[in-house]
Structures are given as C-alpha cells and as structure tokens.
Image: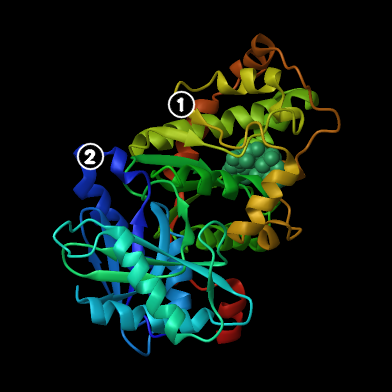
C-alpha cells in the first residue's frame, strides 16, 4: 500500500490549552530537525494533530521512526487520505486489507466520524467496508472481539483517513517549551540518561562538564562531546560548557583530609554549576545522582553537598536501580559510549575511604581557610563552550577525514 501521509498525534498537549500554539510550533520545528537530512516530506501542523505529507520516493519507515522518537509525540500512523466518497473509501480499504491478507488472519473495521454530515454513521460504515473487504479479499475473516488487525477509518471535516498501524511515540512534552536547565554531565552512564529524562518533560538543557587536564585525557573530553551529540540527535543542538577543574581539585587535595575530598569536590562542582546556571538563566540544575549508589550519593552526602546551592536540583534517576538506568541508556543509545574506559576527573582523585556521612560543619571548616571563591570565579571565566548538534563529527568520523 502506498501511503501519502503520516498522521502524528500529540501527547499531553491537549492539557495545555493556553499555550497550545507555542507547543505545536515547537513540536513542528523539533520534528523538522529530527528529519534532517531525509527528503520527500512536508510537515503540516493543525490544532489537534499533524499530517506529514510524503512523496512516493520517501523512506516512510525511517521518517516514522524518527518522528516517533520526538518528545511530545503520542503516536504515529501511516495513512491514506481520500475524498469523503464511499466508493473511494471502499477501494482504499480493500487496498489496505491486501497488505495484511494471509491464511487465518482476522480483522475488524473501526470507524470514527467527526463529520456528522457524512451519510454513513460509524456502524453502517463498518458494515459497508467489512463487506467490501470480505467479498474482495481471499483469506481474511472478521473477528470483532479479538482481531489480528484493525483497519481504522476516520471521517473528518477535510477528508477520510485510513490506516492499520499505530506506532507508539516517545510521549512527554516538546523540548523547548519548559524553560532551561543546566545538566551536570560526566562521562558515566547516568547523567546522559538524566538529561534525556528532563528533556522528555519539555525543558531544554545546556551541559556542564568538569575536566582536569592533564589528569583527564582528550579522549575523555571527546567522550563527553559524543554523549552530547547523541542527546542532541532528537532534541536539537546542545551547548556543552567545559570547566577547567585541575587547580581546584589540586587545592582540595592539599587542604581537605582525604576522606572528605569527594564531598568537597562535589561541593565545588555544584558551586560552579550554580554560578554558571545563573549566568545563562537556567532555572534548575540536573544531575544523574542515584540514592545510595556510591559514597557521594548517600542521603548524608547529598545533604552536605547540596548545602552550597539553593537552586532546585532535579535528580530524575534518584530512585531507579542501576539495571533500570542501563536499559534506558541502551534505549537512547548512550550506553556504548558511556562505558568507554576513559578516566573522569572524579575517578582519578577518588579517595580510598570516602565518608558516607560527612559532617557539614567539618567540611565547611576545612574549606574556609582557602579562597575557593576566587578559584571558582576564575574557573567560570575560563569555561570553554562548544555547540553540539547531530551534525557534529564524532571522533571516529573526524579521524577518517584526516
Ligand atoms: P556513573 O555513575 O554511571 O559512573 P555518573 O555520571 O552517575 O556515572 P557519578 O560519579 O555517579 O557519575 O556522579 C554523580 C553525578 O554527578 C553525575 O550523574 C553527574 O551529574 C555529576 N558529575 C560527576 N562527575 C562530573 C563531571 N566530571 N562533570 C559534570 N558532572 C559530573
Ligand atoms: Mg552515578
């Protein structure tokens, strides 16, 4: 069957009646971005759904796959659009049925009619089309309770639409409709997943990464660029801010007892993130923390670390198990990059016995003797910013060019 449109159903957009146009326009532009560089389509957005017109040579499956991954999309269907004329509808229904025709296969016609002026009501239309299919197709039989396939027919104001497949979309809200956050992005498994989770709720992210050259390598930096590129694939370009963290880490190790260095390191990262978030007008920080996963993520540690900021910190992975996070990382495609074995600034300086229940007053007093604020200011002033999109070369592609 040659489809001529892809029907895109909106997700929770219906709840946001006041901002509906903003939501739809954002979704449309996100879908267009996701479809680059494919050809053979035109995106038309209506108030209650979207129709993507496709030409004969378009790769329908690839277009549908990409659209279904865009946040804000509830589901997609390849559809045939015909005039509201019973003969044309019948002939399209038969063509659609031919695609599923095989011995033993059952079907049912499901009709919906929003145009009440159409001369057939839903029951009569189902009867007509069911009969037409049975008399033209060799094997199919009807099963109204538990059919293998449903042939769906919608009689709308502009035309009739027929389809048999409904592909689940990513759900959520269109990225770009919910304000901005700053994601603390390490090279690990968790933080890219955390970023995608908040984007699913419509917010944009910029990413901040702390690195400590020469203790951390170029490969580790490239890994974070690659992770950002994967996150940008369905959501649009992402700014990645690289913070030089070497001097601060060295100073922490000079001034703070070893078992509290992890706590202090995280506090300094958070102070920098806080300062920078305000500069870029991000309304919250996001991290990949997970309750109890490691010493720095016990309740006691979170308490002592969180004390340096009063920005909201979103922790979408807080209560998940590691295997649940891994499943998500594989789904979004970041897992293989995350497990590349390049040292992060935290792993290099990891103390042997970090405190799992650090005392806030003690950490504060060890930090008090040093002018960390000046160092933080300097680090923020020296942030290197990259803009990453799905067109950014991966390391591998880049090497191939040389
Ligand atoms: P994983 O736990 O899979 O090794 P992770 O990214 O969760 O990776 P953790 O050591 O658990 O790493 O750190 C907890 C959180 O702190 C991270 O999810 C991330 O948000 C933040 N973080 C850690 N290291 C960095 C870094 N170098 N730059 C930016 N954020 C970081
Ligand atoms: Mg983690």
Q: Quadrant of the C terminus?
A: bottom right
Is residue 244 rendered to the left or right of residue 72? right
Instruction: Give the SS element for disc 1.
Output: loop
Name the residue rendered at 42%, 74% in the picture.
63
Is residue 217 rendered to the left or right of residue 79? right
Q: Quadrant of the N terminus?
A: bottom left
- Pinpoint residue 283: horizontal percent, then vertical percent: 37, 33
Find disc 2 in the rendering and name its residue: 17
The answer, for residue 238, to whether it is visible in the render is yes
- Pinpoint residue 59: horizontal percent, then vertical percent: 43, 83
Frontmost residue, 385 versus 300: 300
Name the residue rendered at 50%, 40% in the picture.
379
Q: Quadrant of residue 93?
A: bottom left
Name the residue rendered at 63%, 76% in the picture.
104
Mark number, residue 378: none
Q: Quadrant of residue 331?
A: bottom right
Find disc 1 in the rendering and name its residue: 312
Is residue 234 rendered to the left or right of residue 174? right
Frontmost residue, 163 versus 55: 163
Q: Is residue 131 above or below residue 49?
A: below
Q: Is residue 187 above or below residue 305?
A: below
How many other residues sit within 10 Å of disc 1, few (<14), some (14-19) or many (≥20)? few
Q: Is residue 187 above or below residue 108?
A: above
């Amino acid at each position: 069957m040659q489809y001529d449109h892809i029907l895109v159903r909106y997700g929770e957009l219906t709840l946001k009646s006041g901002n509906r146009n903003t939501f739809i326009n954002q979704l449309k532009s996100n879908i267009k971005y996701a479809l680059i560089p494919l050809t053979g389509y035109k995106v038309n957005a209506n108030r209650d759904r979207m129709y993507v017109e496709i030409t004969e040579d378009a790769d329908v499956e690839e277009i549908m796959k990409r659209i279904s991954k865009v946040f804000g999309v509830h589901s997609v269907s390849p559809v045939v659009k015909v005039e509201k004329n019973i003969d044309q509808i019948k002939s399209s229904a038969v063509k659609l049925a031919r695609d599923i025709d095989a011995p033993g296969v059952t079907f049912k016609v499901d009709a919906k009619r929003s145009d009440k002026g159409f001369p057939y009501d839903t029951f009569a239309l189902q009867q007509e089309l069911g009969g037409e299919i049975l008399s033209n197709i060799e094997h199919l039989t009807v099963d109204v309770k538990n059919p293998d396939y449903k042939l769906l027919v919608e009689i709308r104001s502009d035309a009739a639409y027929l389809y048999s497949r409904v592909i689940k979309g990513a759900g959520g809200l269109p990225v770009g409709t919910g304000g901005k956050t700053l994601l603390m992005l390490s090279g690990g498994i968790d933080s890219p997943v955390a970023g995608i989770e908040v984007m699913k709720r419509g917010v944009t992210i910029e990413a901040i990464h702390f690195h400590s050259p020469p203790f951390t390598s170029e490969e580790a930096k490239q890994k974070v660029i690659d992770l950002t590129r994967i996150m940008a694939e369905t959501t649009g370009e992402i700014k990645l801010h690289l913070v030089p963290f070497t001097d601060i880490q060295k100073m922490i190790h000079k001034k703070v007892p070893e078992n509290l260095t992890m706590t202090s390191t995280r506090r300094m990262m958070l102070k920098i993130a806080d300062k920078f978030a305000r500069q870029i007008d991000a309304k919250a920080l996001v991290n990949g923390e997970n309750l109890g996963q490691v010493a720095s993520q016990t309740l006691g540690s979170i308490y002592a670390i969180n004390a340096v900021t009063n920005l909201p910190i979103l922790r979408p992975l807080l209560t998940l198990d590691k295997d649940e996070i891994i499943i998500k990382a594989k789904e979004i495609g970041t897992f293989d990059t995350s497990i590349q074995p390049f040292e992060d600034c935290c792993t290099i300086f990891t103390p042997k016995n970090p405190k799992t229940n650090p005392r806030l007053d003690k950490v504060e007093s060890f930090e008090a003797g040093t002018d960390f604020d000046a160092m933080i200011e300097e680090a923020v002033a020296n942030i290197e910013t990259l803009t990453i999109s799905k067109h950014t070369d991966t390391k591998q592609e880049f090497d191939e060019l040389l």
